[in-house]
Image (tube, rainbow, N blue to C red):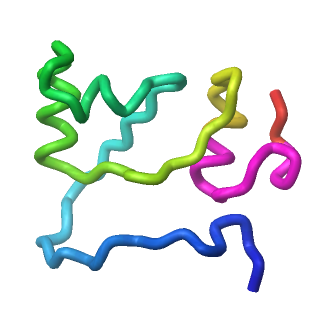
């Protein structure tokens, strides 16, 4: 019942054709405004976001460290729970 992602909501699934390949882009410490706000000059990230899928409620860690950040995003747990701290 009380897992790390408990209480999180997900949007309704939108039917799409299955992709032949999947590319996951994760940039440590990137603020969502840099690809969600058209006033920022990030056309490639904005196109990737509009043509693909984005996580609206991803959790990460501060300071931004790749391995703990990815473990947090994948599990929904903070480092104190998943154990990846460095």
**Vertical order, 55 against 45 (above or below):** below
Q: Is 38 one of the magenta-colored residues? A: no
Q: Give coordinates of residue 65: x percent, y percent.
A: 67, 24
Left or right of 86 on screen, residue 72: left
Quadrant in the picture for residue 27: top left
Q: Residue at x 44, y 34 (%)?
A: 26
Q: Which residue is drawn at 28% across and 78% down?
A: 12
State the quadrant of the N terminus: bottom right
**Vertical order, 81 against 47 (above or below):** below
Q: Give coordinates of residue 38: x percent, y percent.
A: 13, 26
**Vertical order, 69 against 2 (above or below):** above
Q: Give coordinates of residue 76: x percent, y percent.
A: 64, 57
Q: Residue at x 59, y 54 (%)?
A: 74
Left or right of 10 on screen, residue 52: left
Q: Give coordinates of residue 22: x percent, y percent.
A: 29, 51
* Nearest to the observer: residue 2 or residue 18: 2
Magenta range: 70-83
State the quadrant of the C terminus: top right
Left or right of 31 on screen, residue 36: left
Q: Number of marks in the image? A: 0
């Amino acid at each position: 019942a009380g897992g790390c992602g408990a209480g999180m909501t997900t949007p309704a699934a939108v039917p799409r054709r299955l992709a032949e390949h999947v590319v996951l882009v994760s940039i440590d410490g990137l603020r969502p405004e840099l690809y969600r706000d058209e006033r920022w000059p990030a056309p490639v990230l904005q196109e990737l976001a509009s043509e693909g899928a984005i996580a609206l409620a991803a959790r990460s860690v501060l300071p931004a460290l790749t391995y703990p950040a990815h473990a947090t995003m994948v599990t929904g747990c903070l480092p104190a729970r998943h154990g990846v701290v460095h």
